Amino acid sequence: MKVTGIKQFRIADPSGIGGGYHIVKIETDAGISGLGEVGIPSWGKAVTGAIEHLSQLVIGEDPWSTETLWQEMFRSNFFPVDRVYTCAISAIDIALWDIKGKSVDKPVYKLLGGPVRNRVVCYPHIAGSSIEELIAAAREVHEQGWKFVRWHLPSSDESFPEPGVLEPRESINIAIESVAAVRDALPDIEICLDVHTRLDTTHSIQLCQALEPFKPFFIEDPIRAENPGSYEKVSRKVNLPIAAGEQWSSKWGFREAIENEWIDYARIDLCIAGGLTESLKITHLAETHYIDIVPHNPLGPVSAAACVHLCMASTNVGVQEMPKAPGSFATDLFPVQIGFSDGYAFAYDAPGLGVELNEALAEQHRLSEEDDFLPRMTRRDGAFTNW
Ligand SMILES: [Mg+2]
């Protein structure tokens, strides 16, 4: 079996997750194809170009050679690659694993060593334009069977879910009030608060210390990711579980934080970190320090499936990010998706990842060729701050 072609679909889906998806389809001379997904769809042409470039290494090769192809894609231009290329490698690698599974009529989790569990507990995203709305949203997902809720550090202005201005002190105060209110309304629900790299180290430590009585499941991305060593200070001063890693590409991004046990949960993004091949290695590295993974998944059905297959094959799993229940969105674009019930996701005993793309519809909903940026946020003095 040889790879014969790599297609890309940048698909608009305003009612789905994140406004759309960047999907890769790899075809073979055996008539089997596989799907992968890019982790940073807003980087547009940069990643599209990286995938076209890497296609030279992959077309004509055996899709079973995932380790060799990963090494060649990562190292073939002498200089180690970074996020633009690891997004491309991730999508290609995930599609190759989909093909491998289909070629032997096995789900991917069985090729990765699973199952070690039948289903994977998940957390949804919630939001509200006030604390009352946030509580109502938490109650709604709780009644649907979800065991967790997650929202992000609020802005300082009125637009609570999609903020424009962030002043640390005001934002911290709203966050403490909202965590206390949700904990009071739903004593049994697990709370995940995503700081989203919006605070500096000192403010984040203050926030975490104030949240300790409410026992959140974790605080995510309390600081920015460029300098992993700053997690040493956070972990020394905070007595709450810390989750981080969605901005790190490859095992080397995670190495220091795992080896020093600066983080409690490894937020691997399979579609940024290097696909299933690399994420399995990071998962096993985390296992040596009793650190559980919480795969980052703010993307579409292919990413969701890859994450759940990894979790079904891994012993050290905390919870899986799942903004919306699989099968409840984008069902026209992806008519076959993984399963979901009572707050848990699961892969069926079906070949590959168990996801199918409606290519004709994807062609009709192509994203514009213009590259995009995520929302931007400022301080009140007009200075740029992380969204
Ligand atoms: Mg996050």
Image (tube, helix red, strand yellow):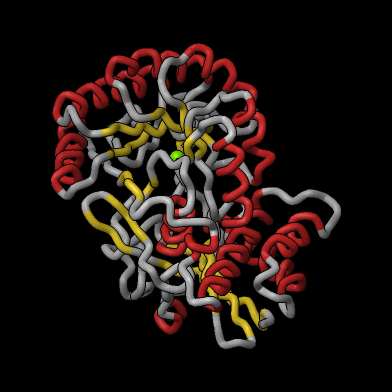
Q: Residue at x 32, y 26 (%)?
A: 216
Q: Quadrant of ligand 1?
A: top left
Query: Where is residue 111, by image quadrant?
Result: bottom right
Query: Where is residue 72, by image quadrant?
Result: bottom right
Can you see residue 252? Answer: yes
Can you see residue 198? Answer: no
Name, please, the residue furthest toward the right: 78
Please tell me which residue lies in front, 367 or 187: 187
Query: In the rendered picture of this protein, how many numbered marks are placed on residues?
Result: 0
Q: Residue at x 29, y 23 (%)?
A: 174
Q: Residue at x 34, y 16 (%)?
A: 212
Please tell me which residue lies in front, 138 or 279: 279
Check the image and report above or below for 273 versus 242: below
Question: Percent from the top left, x then y, of residue 144?
Answer: 16, 50
Q: Residue at x 62, y 66 (%)?
A: 92
Check the image and report above or below for 96 versus 364: above
Question: Percent from the top left, x then y, of residue 156?
Answer: 34, 27
Question: Percent from the top left, x then y, of residue 278?
Answer: 63, 51
Check the image and report above or below for 285 versus 361: above
Question: Percent from the top left, x then y, of residue 334?
Answer: 37, 72
Left or right of 50, for residue 237: left
Left or right of 372, for residue 136: left
Image quarter where the N terminus lies is bottom right
